[in-house]
Structures are given as structure tokens and as C-alpha cells.
Amino acid sequence: MAGVSLLTLLDDIAAILDDVALMSKVAAKKTAGVLGDDLALNAQQVSGVSADRELPVVWAVAVGSFRNKCILVPAALLISAFIPWAVTPLLMFGGLYLCYEGFEKLHHTYEKRKAKQASLTQGGCDANDAVQVEDDIPLIDDLQAYEAQKIKGAIRTDFVLSAEIIAITLGVVAESSFLTQVVTLSVIALLMTIGVYGLVAGIVKLDDAGLYLSQRKGEGLLTRFGRWFGEKLVNAAPYLMRGLTIVGTVAMFMVGGGILTHGLHWMSVQIETAALWVEPLALIGPVLSFLTPSLLNTIFGVFAGAIALLFISTVQKLKAA
């Protein structure tokens, strides 16, 4: 009897593992889009720190991301079990925060450029002032505070994106047993954290890898190709980081707007209708149909972020008055 019980237990464990593997595969496919946005956003968030502090910053954000998921996984299971109606409002609040953060970033960049142009137009800045107008590189005395601010902002953004990943995964395993839900959510959370921040670490160290390759000695074919490729990497790294900054900001609006429109059923229906409307167009119809939802979600996210920033700015002014 003991042997039969052991075999039954092993069979149950194997069945659970099969379910977890299947559910994890499905959840990974459904969260792939969010994962791409998460990667772009976090690579952009940790850019701008000194080269020797890039990996420590990525590690600090990765630890913060893991803590986020240690909070989100149990919270998602509890909410799903006791107050499932709260999942959508919480996700929408997170989506609105992403839109606000993206628009606040655009507004800050606009104000900074306007101040620079005004200063140059007035002719009242010398060489030192002109360097300090571009405040992307912080003063030496502020490096520690700047780094802490970067880490805190990246962890906040990760919390919202992680919440969406967990919510999507929870939707996939909603009909499964509680144990399967727990294991699948844990597997997805762990794999996403390792995958995203492993890639982020690789992206932010591309310039160092390029510098190493470009300085190799020797006249062999592979060595010369390595030097050429390293020089290209070094030259491309700044453009890559700028591109990630743009992609990261767009991703905030796309993900945040997508969360909001999915929460507003009538808006989601209108977006699906628009995608179906352009599909019959010759040649480019299928492409437009594929791109339309993302484009409309992004536009909606921009407007939502502008309204959120206006509201928060108004409240702050009223409090200060």
C-alpha cells in the first residue's frame, strides 16, 4: 500500500508539473508583448549612470523587481480568490500611472529644451552654463541621489508592468487548481525577472564589450573583424540608448493606454472595430489592422497621461496656494 501511495503521489506531481509547463508556455506567449515593453523601459530607466555603476544599478532594480513579484504573486492569488472584481480597477490605476509618468517625462524634456533655447536666445550663458543646461549628466555631488532616484523610478515602473504580467498569467491559469496557479505564477515571475534584467545588463554594457573588442591586438582575420565590430558597437551604443529612451516612453503610453482601453469595454470594442475597418484595404490592410490597436492605445495613453498630469499639477497648485 505504501508503494502504491508513493506512485500515486508521484503521478499527481508529474501531472501538476505537466500542467505548470503547459500553462507557463501559454502565459509566456501572452506576456511576450509586455515583456518587450518591460525590457525597453528598464533599459531606458537605468541609462545615464556612470559606467562603473551600471551593473550595480541593474542588480538593485532586479532585486526590487523580485521583491515586487514577492508582493504581487500572493496579492494576485488573494484578490482572485476573495475580490476578483478588484483586479481590473487596480490594473487601470497602474495603467494610468504609466501614462502619467510617460507624459510627465515628455513635459520635463519640453520644459528643459525651452529653457535652454531661452537661455541661448538671451545670450546670457557662458560655456560652463551651456554644459550644465544639458542636465542629463548629474553633478558629482548628486550622483548618489541621482542613482537612488533612477533605481526608485525603475522599481516603480517595474511594479506596474509586473502587475500586468501577473494578471495576464492569472487569467491563463484561472480555471486550474490552486497549486498549479501558485507554481505557474512563481515560475513566470522568476523567469521574467531573470530574463528582463539579464538582457538589460547586456544592453547597458554593450559599449564596454565594444571597447574591449576594439582594443584587441593582433592581425588575424577574426581579430581584425572583432576590432571593426567593437568600434561599430561603441559608436552605436549612444544611439541605442537614445532609441531605448524613445521606445521606453512610447511603451509607457502603449501599455498604459492598452490597460485603460481594455478596462473600458466600449473603448476596446471601438478599437477592435477600427482594426476590422482597415483590414480590407489593399496590400497594407492586414498590416494596418495589426498596427491600429497599438497606435490607438498609444494615442489614448498620451491623452490620459496629459489629463492626469494636468489634474495632479492643479491639485499641487491648489495645495500650495
Image (cartoon, rainbow, N blue to C red):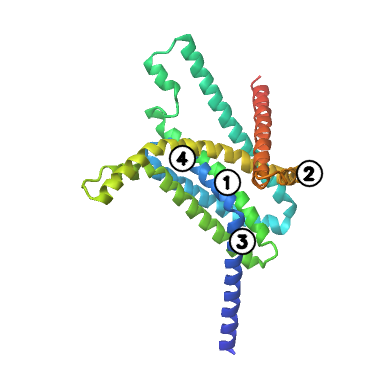
What residue is shown with label 4? 46
- Disc 1 residue type (three-letter): Phe
First in residue order: circle 4 vs circle 3: 3
Q: CA distance from mark 2 to mark 4?
A: 37 Å
User: What secondary structure is found at the residue carrying circle 1?
Assistant: helix
- Quadrant placement of the N terminus: bottom right
- Quadrant placement of the C terminus: top right
- Disc nearest the viewer among 3 and 1: 3
What residue is shown with label 3? 26
First in residue order: circle 2 vs circle 1: 1
The quarter of the picture where residue 310 lies is top right
Residue 91, given in percent of the width and then of the height, sits at: 67, 46
The reply to whether callout 2 and callout 1 are in contact (CB within 8 Å) is no
The reply to whether callout 2 and callout 4 are in contact (CB within 8 Å) is no
First in residue order: circle 3 vs circle 1: 3
The reply to whether callout 1 and callout 4 are in contact (CB within 8 Å) is no
Residue at 40% over, 38% down? 236
What residue is shown with label 2? 266
